[in-house]
Image (cartoon, rainbow, N blue to C red):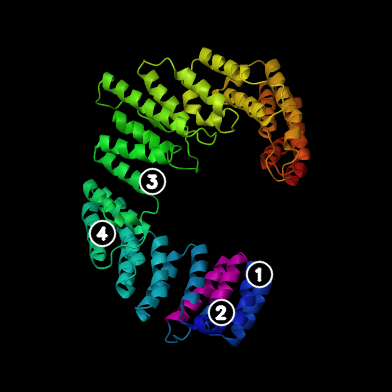
Amino acid sequence: MASKFGLAGGIPERRVRPIWDAVDSRQYKSALKLCTALLAKHPTSPYALALKALTLERMGKPDEALSVCLEAKELLYSNNIFHFDDLTLSTLQIVFQRLERLDLATSCYEYACTKYPNNLELMMGLFNCYVREYSYVKQQQTALRMYKTVGEERFLLWAVCSIQLQAYFSSGGEKLLAFAEALLKKHISSHSLHEPEALSLYVSILEQQAKYDAALEVLSGDLGSLMGREEDKLRLQGRLLTQACNYVAASEIYQKVLESCPDDWESFLHYLGCLLERDVKLPKPTTGEHTCSSCSVDSNKTSLSEEVVESRLASALLFVQKLQKNDSSDSVRGPHLANIEIERQHRLSGNSTKFMEALVNYFHRFGHLSCSSSDVEIYLHMLSGDEITELLDTISRSFDASSVSVKALGLTITTFKVQELLGTLLSKSTTDLQRIAKGMVETFYKNLPLSRDLDPQESMHGEELLSMASNILVQLFWRTRNLGYLLEAVLVLEFGLTVRKHVWQYKITLVHLYSYLGALPLAHRW
């Protein structure tokens, strides 16, 4: 390509770089002047026209940008092929995409690939165009052409992924998946596989065809060594065994995973699900947390008798207790949450008297952590009103609220969070809510010395107390329509920002409050 020899789109790079710098710094008028000067010297350069179109589009002139792009496209289609390179096409593609004319970008790449049928960069650009248009068949055809041209594994994987998408979104999936499997088998026989992603894709193709035994055989063979971590390999084996309804072997596999990674909550749920031969309800992943309060084991679907269920729950409890003894650190919460889940299963079958005890023990050990209330949210909603009161009283009695320590502060916040999660605050009287909000602010103020040595941009200990207090004050406003509560909420948050000015949660709430009050300059400031 021309750019490899110090040229950009057939133009010396020193003449092009200032234009890109001006565009990147949003100095569009300067960029347009530079484009005009460049076109004066290179009037038939598609790349110069593409840069002008890009600048015009950024200036908010889409019609002019499209007209210039079409002019550049006509030049590309002419017999002057010296400047026909991927840099020109990619610049045009950026503009066409922003103008929502992906079809024009694709046609440019298609024409380029007919002129240079073995040019890898152009074929990759064409493949990306088809990806943006969801043209799965053409993606597959282009990826296979690249694979045949250079024989690289990645292009075969692109083709197989395109076939998977076709199988998912169209009919005839069985034949398509069989074709993908055949492509991979042929490649493995001649070149083997070299990337973990390639192995995962091969296993997923077999899994989609319900060839679980074949997938397990692949993992246990030489290709299985591509998995970087043994735990990842075991998780995959456990999933395949579960889908093959081999619950005994699957539970043993998940047990190995938990012995190595005791905080793997998802693996524990699968382990328990396999023991009880029940479905595991897992939500779509949204965070990187180890635990998820909305995950659970289905309590209804099982073919086992009640005696067998109780026996297997007892064996799971022994295993979990073993994990707890092996790891006594406060950072590993999984085995202790597992104890609550097991007692939940007992409770659902009407045989548990230790569900509350498991929750109390969890709060005694981890209640000072900010995540403790959200960890057990699904379990808290199973409690009756009397049990909630008992739990809150037990937590409150477990520490000295008057002491100034990180642990006592954490337990105090957890008590408030539990009430907030369960909605018990909403049922309290106006006087009680005033007292609670005042107590939150006083607790925050009293514990300020704990954050004295922290970096100014670090989160303070107990900073969520002011957000919770302001929320209560806003609720009091909606209940009484007394504007004073809103003003107090503003003062609380302004106080927090005086102490630590980097707390974005305070700022966002203040923007909403000031906007509601009509104090737009103050809202704009925050």
Q: Which mark is residue 28?
A: 1
Asked if the residue under mark 4 is in contact with the one under mark 1, i.e. CB atoms within 8 Å, the reply is no
Mark 2 or mark 4, whichever is nearer to me: 4
Q: Which mark is residue 180?
A: 4
Q: Earlier in the sequence, mark 2 or mark 4?
A: 2
Residue at horizontal 39%, vertical 18%? 347
Kindly identify which residue carries mark 2.
48
Going by the numbered disc 3, the residue's amino acid type is Glu
Residue 394 vertical position relative to residue 369 in the rendered view, above or below:
above
Residue 450 or residue 85, whichever sits in front = 450
Residue 107 vertical position relative to residue 137 in the rendered view, above or below:
below
Residue 475 vertical position relative to residue 74 in the rendered view, above or below:
above
Q: Measure the alpha-carbon separation of dots 2 and 3.
A: 53 Å
Would you say 455 lies left or right of 198 here?
Answer: right
Q: Which mark is residue 274?
A: none
Q: Magenta residues, as a range?
A: 50-77
Q: Earlier in the sequence, mark 2 or mark 1?
A: 1
At label 2, counting other C-alpha atoms closer than 10 Å, the crowd grade (few under 14, some 14-19, many 20 or more) is: many
SS assignment at label 1: helix
Residue 33 is one of the magenta-drawn residues: no
Q: Measure the alpha-carbon separation of dots 1 and 4.
A: 48 Å
**Identity of the residue furthest to the front in this view:** 326
Going by the numbered disc 1, the residue's amino acid type is Tyr
Would you say 433 lies left or right of 82 here?
Answer: right
Q: Measure the alpha-carbon separation of dots 3 and 1.
A: 52 Å
Asked if the residue under mark 3 is in contact with the one under mark 4, i.e. CB atoms within 8 Å, the reply is no
Q: Measure the alpha-carbon separation of dots 2 and 1.
A: 15 Å
Kindly identify which residue carries mark 3.
231
